[in-house]
Each structure stands twice: as structure tokens, then as C-alpha cells.
Amino acid sequence: MDSIPTPRTNHALLRLPSPIGRLELTADAGGILTLSIETNGQLPLDATAETPSPVLQRAAEQLDEYFAGTRQTFDLPVHLTRGTEFQRSVWARLATLKFGDVISYGALGSEIGRVGSGRAIGGAVGANPVPIIIGCHRVLATSGQITGYSAGQGITTKAWLLDHEKIAHR
């Protein structure tokens, strides 16, 4: 979420409205690379012309269905080209969480063999390049408290996504 995609001629780009602000998706031939949520009226590639692709059109349809409450899983190719091995291990575990599931930072660390590395887990969760599709919003403190969110309008955006999935939080 905190890495800004670099526009390339071989990357497709599509924007769409959502209840949490405009979304911007990029993809290459392998699948979706990034999903950015508008922050303070801005998207990372606002100045770049859209270049839709079939995979991005499919993603837009599935995201619309998710926000309408008629889709709970995404059937989209995601191409995670960036990130460390550690980050990719966190994202792989996040990808297994289903609609309405929740996990704590500590439990996530334990499950990937990194007990006691809550801060590093939080950093990897925050670096997820495809939020919503890989549900990083489903990670909370052990107490159920929202401790942060690096996309969109931060905690407000995360709270909306949690409420949408009926996940209890504080």
C-alpha cells in the first residue's frame, strides 16, 4: 500500500469509484500488480491515462460486487512482483483469510514462524500492494482494536471494510 506503482507502457491501468473512494488498479500480463485507494482526493497515477485490460475489467466487476455485498471471494490473478520474502509470506497468509475472518498481528506472526515480530508483521501488512483483494484490513490487535491502516483515509477506511464484512472491532 505504501509503494507507488511506476507507470510502464506494458502495464494496464484502470480507475473506478467505490464507497471508500476511487480505486486505481494496475496489472501486467501476469495479473493485478496494485490496488490503491484514494487518499485526500489523490491516486498515485492520477496524471496517467487509463489503459484498461480484460483482467482489470474483471477486477472492477468483482470489486463492484464486493461493495454491493454480493461477492465474498475474489477470483483474480494477482502478480506480486515486489516485496521481500518475509512480506510475501505475510501476504500469502493474508490471502487465505476469507470474507469475515479476522486474525491478530501476533497470531499472524506465530502462523508464519515469526513469533514476537508484531512490528515487522504490521509493516508487511501495511505494504500489501493489493488491499481488499488480499484482505489486510482483516488484521487487528489481539484486543480487536484497529491500530492503523495505510490505505485510503486510514482507520476510517479500515473500519468501513470491517463493518462491511461484519467483523467486530474497537
Image (cartoon, rainbow, N blue to C red):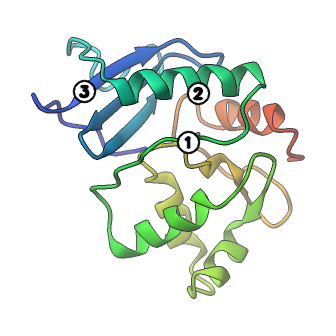
Between residues 102 and 53, which one lies in front from this camera angle? 53
User: 63 above or below 83?
Assistant: above
Q: CA distance from mark 3 to mark 1?
A: 18 Å
Looking at the picture, how far across and down is residue 90, in whole percent?
52, 68
Of callouts 3 and 1, the N-terminal one: 3
Question: In which quarter of the view is residue 50 placed?
Answer: top left
Question: In which quarter of the view is residue 71 placed?
Answer: top right
Question: In which quarter of the view is residue 88 placed?
Answer: bottom left
Looking at the picture, how far across and down is residue 18, in whole percent?
59, 16
Residue linked to disc 2: 62
Residue linked to disc 3: 12
User: Which quadrant is home to the N terminus?
Assistant: top left
Q: CA distance from mark 3 to mark 2?
A: 17 Å
Residue linked to disc 1: 75
Between residues 76 and 35, which one lies in front from this camera angle? 76
Q: Please give the name of the residue rendered at 31% of the width and 26% of the height, measured from the top-left corner.
A: 44
Q: Secondary structure at mark 2?
A: helix
Looking at the picture, how far across and down is residue 49, in whole percent?
21, 11
